[in-house]
Amino acid sequence: MTDSTVTLNPIANGELPGHQVELGGDAPLCLDSGAILGPYTIAYQTFGTLNADKSNAILICHALTGDQFPAGQHPITGKGGWWELMVGPGKVIDTDRFFVISTNVLGGCMGTTGPSSIDPKTDKPYGLDFPVITIGDMVRAQAMLIDHLDIEKLFCVIGGSMGAMQVLEWASKYGDRLYAAVPIAGAPRHSAQNIAFHEVGRQAIMADPDWCQGNYILEGKRPRRGLAVARMEAHITYLSEPALHRKFGRRLQEREQVTYGFDADFEVESYLRHQGSTFVERFDANSYLYITRAMDYFDLAAEHDGILAHAFRDTKVRFCVVSFSSDWLYPTVESRTVVHALNAVAANVSFLEVQTDKGHDAFLLDEPVLHETLSGFIEGTVRHSGLAL
Amino acid sequence: MNALPTIGPLRADLQLISDMIEPNSRVLDVGCGDGALLAYLAQEKSVDARGIELSHEGVKSCVALGLSVIQGDADTDLTDYPSDAFDYVVLGQTLQATRSPKDVLETLVRIGRHAVVSFVNFGHWRTRLSLMLNGRVPVPAGNQHGWHDNPDIHLCTVLDFVDLCEELGLKIDKGLSLDRHNQVRQIKTGSQMANLRGEQAIFLLHRE
């Protein structure tokens, strides 16, 4: 699997675990850009069993480079799912009790329609002909899937980072279709700094000659170097300075002294190079462009005359907002803005800033306080909803 | 699975606060600590219970109990709530730690139809005697801090508080004092007795 010639084979070969459904044949998606998309495929995975009254469904929304495999063995990397610590039998999101749905977002590269999918009009990969999508579009497509699964109301929609943006979008647009919303380490909009980091990543991809103006699949190439650099840069933003220092300090990589050259002298360089090179084996460069763009465009207040509270007017959803003290990508102040907006509509909201030095990625890591808090919140919501779960 | 965890008896002052709150009402407890009052109100009075708490530990235990509590502070995190969002807003032994008690009090009676405020009475005779005899700033029993690092930066007496309510045009519906033997007395406004004998004071207020 680490062979560099292996691309996204399980998908190409139709061996992707989980489910794939074609939607929008008769009712295509009207995207925020004005473009029409349909039919489109949503790839999703489920865990646990849907109960008789279909009240125990939890939708997990993934982050920028996540996918529909939060638990179980990943079909490409062979490793555990990205939220293995959170999702599974007896875990916080208990698959013995809940029916867990996780989709690959629109624009993704794990089976859901995205820029690497075949455009039915041309029988070629979309490439840059794929319409620009938004977080709103991703959620719209998810809602179509939930319709398709014939689930009227989700028990909970939960996600971290970009997943948190989808959660907020769900609560805002489909407030009567969920009991609880858990946005973790998120923001109600992308800041100038967030956009700036994404732009560097996109420029790295587009500067790679193998990107071929987005047509690399047809040209039989892949912009590995550009995508790897984008990943390296982004990965720094997911960690905190203390976490980087603790992990690597100024330690040298398998050498006694610096080489006075540009080899990876430092452990941290070697680590980032590794992060970059493994990432390109499982992710599509154009998907990276489209999904980062969707995040940049996200601004929930903007469509409500700049007043975020109006996005949640009369909401009956129970919220649990979580941030991390050392997250400088989506700092606590962003979550607090959401909390204040929810207060302004007297929404039912819990909010905790978890004290940790692990940075933005803390939502994926072993953070007992996060797990304890979410368990309590889920339990409280079960009690409050009156559902027999 | 569907019941709240069992909770022990409430602290005496919290019990008095709870007695002031009607069942089935909407309550915001500002400075809710470990959530003891909220859990009690939710369970015993079917109250829609919400809380705000500054400490990470407190918020964590509240949310883990299934209570809706946000991490925040009375000075900065109350202003967003709409008027009359709650039937009662409780500020239990927190007023003295706010930067601006007057603003906080005004906000309490705006966002709640009633406010329930409790505080340690700095006019208690022991406090007065302690300053007179020792010549040092009195620190109420149970407070581990010294004068320089005490988070209670705006201590007041029953009379001070009543004056502030008057200044803000607040109607006192009920005033109770509590001493260390859990002896409860009605506070008659204008009377010096409660200010001398009450170690803690609890007021039910609303804006006129």
Image: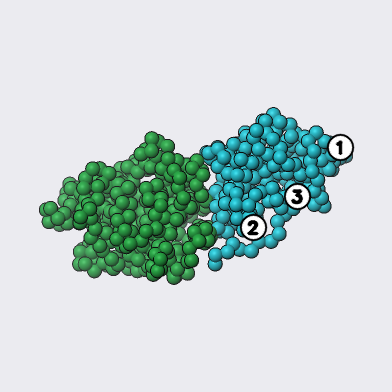
Disc 1 chain ID = B
**Pointer 3 and pointer 1 on the same chain:** yes
Q: Which mark is residue B44?
A: 2
Disc 2 chain ID = B
- Amino acid identity at mark 2: Glu
Q: Are marks 2 and 1 in contact (CB under 8 Å)?
A: no
**Pointer 3 and pointer 2 on the same chain:** yes
- Amino acid identity at mark 3: Gly
Residue A280 lies left or right of residue B102; in this view the side is left
The picture places residue B148, in percent across and down from the top left corner, at 71, 39
The picture places residue B54, in percent across and down from the top left corner, at 60, 47
The picture places residue A320, in percent across and down from the top left corner, at 49, 52
- Amino acid identity at mark 1: Met
Q: How far apart are marks 3 and 2 (CA)?
A: 28 Å
In what element is the residue under mark 2?
A: helix
Question: Is residue B68 something that shows in the picture?
Answer: yes
Quadrant in the picture for residue B132: top right
Which is more foreground, mark 2 or mark 1? 2
Quadrant in the picture for residue A221: bottom left
Q: Please report whichever mark, 3 or 2, sits nearer to the chain's N-terminal start.
A: 2
Q: Quadrant of the C terminus of chain B?
A: top right
Q: Residue B132 carries which label?
A: 1
* Residue sitting at x 43%, y 58%: A156
**Residue lying furthest right in this view?**
B133
Q: In the picture, which chain is cyan?
A: B
Q: Please report whichever mark, 3 or 1, sits nearer to the chain's N-terminal start.
A: 1
The residue wearing badge 3 is B142
What color is chain A drawn in?
Answer: green
Q: Are marks 3 and 1 in contact (CB under 8 Å)?
A: no
In what element is the residue under mark 3?
A: loop
In what element is the residue under mark 1?
A: helix
Please rate how many residues cluster around mark 1, counting C-alpha atoms within 10 Å: few if below 14, some from 14 to 19, many from 20.
few
